[in-house]
Amino acid sequence: MRPLQISADTAQKLAKSLNIPLEQVMHMPQHILLAKLAELNTKEENDKKD
């Protein structure tokens, strides 16, 4: 599997927001990364409602 086709800056922001190492972000399968981003988005929306 090849690394995600995202910029280094984007990868750093994702690693920080997801609290996972940068290397793990770069080698994560795209469908799992999208699922984690959806979870993060849902959590942020719920926090805004409270």
Image: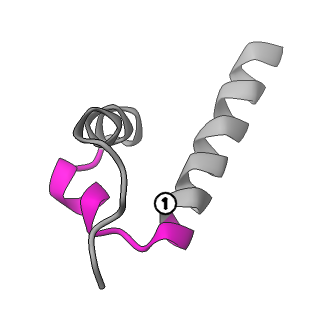
Q: Residue at x 58, y 40 (%)?
A: 40
User: Residue 9: image x %, image y %?
Assistant: 27, 32
User: Residue 28: image x %, image y %?
Assistant: 35, 68
Instruction: Using a 10 Å C-alpha cutoff, classify the residue at mark 1 as few (fewer than 14 neighbours), some (14 to 19) or many (20 or more).
Output: some
Q: Residue at x 66, y 37 (%)?
A: 41
Region of the chain picked out in magenta, as a range: 20-32
Asked whether 21 falls inside the magenta stretch, the response is yes
Q: Residue at x 70, y 21 (%)?
A: 47
Q: Quarter-wise, where is residue 42 in the image?
A: top right
Indicate the quadrant containing the C terminus: top left, top right, bottom left or bottom right.
Answer: top right
Indicate the quadrant containing the N terminus: top left, top right, bottom left or bottom right.
Answer: bottom left
With 45 as the anchor, is 5 left or right in this view? left
Q: Quarter-wise, where is residue 49 in the image?
A: top right
User: Residue 20: image x %, image y %?
Assistant: 27, 48
- 39 relative to 34, above or below: above
Question: Can residue 50 be seen from the camera position used here?
Answer: no
Question: Which residue occupies the foreground of this view, 48 or 2?
Answer: 2
Magenta segment, principal secondary structure?
Answer: helix
Element class at badge 1: helix
- In the picture of the structure, the residue carrying the numbered disc 1 is 33
Asked whether 31 falls inside the magenta stretch, the response is yes
With 28 as the anchor, is 35 left or right in this view? right
What colour scheme was applied to this rendering of the protein?
Answer: one colour
Question: Can residue 34 be seen from the camera position used here?
Answer: yes
- 41 relative to 30, above or below: above
Q: Quarter-wise, where is residue 11 in the image?
A: top left
Question: Which amino acid type is marked by label 1?
Answer: Leu
Q: Residue at x 28, y 78 (%)?
A: 2
